[in-house]
Amino acid sequence: MRILLSNDDGVHSPGLVALYEGLKSLGNLEVVAPDRDHSGASNALTLNRPLTVEEHPSGFRSIDGTPTDCVHLAVNGLFPESFDRVVSGINTHANLGDDIIYSGTVAAATEGRHLGLPAIAVSLVSEGQNHFETAARVVRMLLESERPLSLGPRSILNVNVPDVPWEELAGFRVTRLGNRERAESAVPMTCPRGKERYWIGAAGKGGDAGPGTDFHAVAQGYVSLTPVHIDMTRHEALVSLRTWADSLPDVHGGGV
């Protein structure tokens, strides 16, 4: 098995190192990750300048770009051999519900999927214990399953792991994305030159966090497995939207 590993926390992240150590005996692993923390980068792709690749003594490669850049270059230029799949993580914080819209971890996985590779995004729902080895063991179990997982086209698996020792995991639950309440207010501050600056406020708590959601599963000690479809079309709204659009004036009617 030939696996590409990436993340959004940077090439020196302990989560990435733990993932590599946990999977390295499965086959041929290549690591291509940002040279610094790019949390919240979403699917940004760098198009206004060339990118620099650096190889580290560990064998890991870093790129002065986004998580999406890393996967795109790795699959489409850095290596002559193809990959079997992409694994992104282990993120140092949760990627639950709305988080996936902003997440560079999820973006790295979706870029792999865009390029035709099965992909997993994995995050540790951190409680400050940093049990990255638990999350790495979860990913290994998923990859070693006797029944290959197929989610269909343009889909990835989003995995969130409670921050507990392996022995304390309650098991696995298949979940849907929940959603968060409104984010906290921006935090003003004054820089050393006397100018006002702002920190983005903290993410809101789980608003839709009941049974069946990823929020609820991890709160109960379960690993959350959520299939995420990259097609963002709200298919259920197409019929009502067509009816509404049919009531609009004719763009060519009545004008001069």
Image: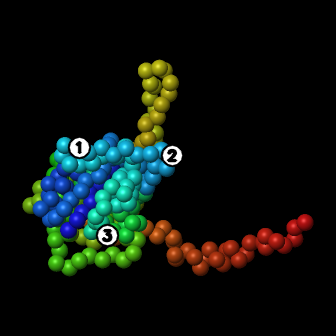
Q: Nearer the viewer, residue 105 or 26?
A: 26
Judge the density around disc 1: few (<14), some (14-19), many (≥20) Cα neighbours within 10 Å: few
Q: What's the distance in space between the residues labelled 3 and 1, CA to CA? A: 27 Å
Is the residue under label 3 in contact with that under label 2 (CB below 8 Å)?
Answer: no
Q: Which mark is residue 242?
A: none
Of the numbered discs 2 and 1, the one sitting upstream in the chain is: 2
In the figure, is residue 245 to the left or right of 65?
right
How far from the left and from the top, in percent, is residue 238? 57, 76
Residue 239's image quarter? bottom right
**Identity, as a three-letter code, of the amino acid under mark 2:** Asn
Residue 73's image quarter? bottom left
Provide the residue designation for mark 1.
Answer: 56
How far from the left and from the top, in percent, is residue 220? 22, 62
Judge the density around disc 2: few (<14), some (14-19), many (≥20) Cα neighbours within 10 Å: few
Of the numbered discs 3 and 1, the one sitting upstream in the chain is: 1
Q: Quadrant of the N terminus?
A: bottom left
Provide the residue designation for mark 3.
Answer: 118
